[in-house]
Image (tube, rainbow, N blue to C red):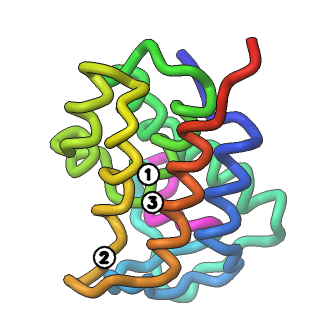
Amino acid sequence: MRSTSINGLKIIKAYEGLKLSAYLCPAKVATIGYGSTRYPDGRKVLMGEKLVNEAMATQLLLATLEPFESVVNKSLPNLNQYQFDALVSLCYNIGGSAFGRSTLVRKAKVNANDPSIADEFMRWNKAGGKVLQGLTNRRAAEAKLYFTPCKV
């Protein structure tokens, strides 16, 4: 099973940001580290919890990414590494169910190099029905990574 490379981790870390103390994300869900809402054992993050340091947050992120990597691996097994990394970042942010139902996935299953996939990334730039500049920037970075020519 493929896992997220440093390129995908950079995007996730940059746009999730690092918070060592639990906080409420825009969707009002308790979150910690680099956007983790649950621990690897399935427990939800609770307000008041703290992580010791950045290394601990990175370890939590890597463990938290596994189910999202699995969703992308199962949905689209023939992606290059850049495509995979971009889609794991998207899936991590919007959730596996929304990702699986997306037009982006449907298009990528037909032709992973379809240029209209870039537009599909940009459809996921809202929270609570409002366009958020941070999400717009993240989707642009994900689309750019997705369409980066992969060196073999």
Q: Position of residue 89 (x, y in %)?
A: 51, 50
Disc 3 crowd, CA 10 A, few/some/many (<14, 14-19, 20+)? some
What's the amino acid at mark 3? Arg
The residue range painted magenta reads: 34-41
Q: Position of residue 95 (x, y in %)?
A: 32, 53
What's the amino acid at mark 1? Leu
Q: How many marks?
A: 3
Q: In which quarter of the view is residue 44 placed?
A: bottom left
Disc 1 is placed on an element classified as helix
Disc 2 is placed on an element classified as strand
The residue positioned 74% from the left and 11% from the top of the image is 152
Query: Which residue is nearer to you in this view: 27 or 60?
Result: 27
Q: Which residue extends farthest front?
A: 115
Which label's residue is closer to the chain start, 3 or 1? Answer: 3
Which label's residue is closer to the chain start, 2 or 1? Answer: 1
- CA gap between label 2 and label 3 equals 22 Å
Label placed on residue 90:
1
- CA gap between label 2 and label 1 equals 13 Å
Q: Which callout, 2 or 3, points to the residue nearer the camera?
A: 2
Q: Is residue 67 left or right of residue 81?
A: left
Q: Position of residue 26 (x, y in %)?
A: 39, 85
What's the amino acid at mark 2? Lys
The residue positioned 20% from the left and 83% from the top of the image is 129
Q: Position of residue 90 (x, y in %)?
A: 44, 51
Q: Which callout, 3 or 1, points to the residue nearer the camera?
A: 1
The residue positioned 56% from the left and 82% from the top of the image is 22
Disc 1 crowd, CA 10 A, few/some/many (<14, 14-19, 20+)? many
**Residue highlighted by disc 2:** 126
Q: Is residue 33 left or right of residue 37?
A: right
Query: Which residue is nearer to you in this view: 135 or 110?
Result: 110
**Residue highlighted by disc 3:** 38
